[in-house]
Image (cartoon, grey):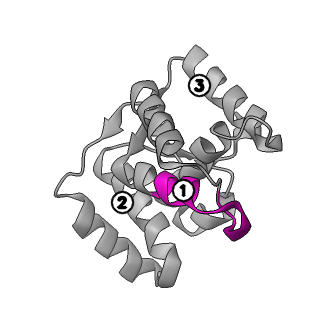
Amino acid sequence: MAYLIDTNIILRMAQPNHLMCAEALNALGILRQRKEDCYLTHQNLVEFWRSATRPVEKNGLGMSLAEAEAELKRLETLFPILPDIPEIYPEWKRLVLKYGVMGVNVHDARLVAVIIAHGLTHILTFNIKDFARYANEITPVHPTKI
């Protein structure tokens, strides 16, 4: 199997004192031991930057630009980045129309489109409910269920 790693996983990895950091790292360690492929997308990295550089009082990580850049470089070395290919947009459009996706949920639909367009099947995420509507398309997996 091949997994797309959701942004919430890489955000927790960047917070060593967060309760879910150990869960994220443990799940990724198990996947690597099993020789499962784990990927990120450019979208994950953009979303990471948004949350990493947002102030703590606004539910961000409060990283400086230098800290965020260092973490971004680390992520780029840890995971292969799936390219943005032309098949993603029509797949995203199909998904949002089929599932009636609106508002902020369009970002999760795009991650699902990336998974499908690249022939993956699974996403590692703490937010299982965000991907539940796509259960006939992909398999969301919580880190504690690996």
Q: Which residues are magenta?
A: 47-60
In this figure, which residue is indicated by the disc labeled 2? 113
Q: Is residue 29 visible?
A: yes
Q: Quadrant of residue 2?
A: top left
Quarter in which the C terminus is drawn: top right
In this figure, which residue is indicated by the disc labeled 1? 53
Tell me the element at label 1.
helix
Asked if the magenta segment contains residue 121, the reply would be no
The relative height of residue 32 versus residue 22 in the rendered view (above or below) is above
Main SS, magenta residues: helix
Q: Which numbered disc, 2 or 1, marks the residue closer to the eye? A: 1
Is tag 2's residue or tag 3's residue first in the polypeptide sequence? 3
Res 31 label = 3
**C-alpha span from label 3 to label 1:** 29 Å
Q: Which numbered disc, 3 or 1, marks the residue closer to the eye? A: 1
In the rendered structure, the answer to whether residue 112 lies left or right of residue 27 reads: left
**C-alpha span from label 2 to label 1:** 26 Å
Q: Nearer the viewer, residue 99 or 66?
A: 66
Say whether marks 2 and 3 touch (CB < 8 Å).
no
Tell me the element at label 2.
helix
The relative height of residue 110 versus residue 8 in the rendered view (above or below) is below
Q: Crowding at label 1, few (<14), some or many (≥20) Cα neighbours within 10 Å?
A: some
Q: Crowding at label 3, few (<14), some or many (≥20) Cα neighbours within 10 Å?
A: some
Q: Amino acid at mark 2?
A: Ala
What residue is shown at x 30% (from left), y 45% (from top)?
118
The relative height of residue 86 versus residue 94 in the rendered view (above or below) is above
Tell me the element at label 3.
helix
In the rendered structure, the answer to whether residue 61 lies left or right of residue 90 reads: right
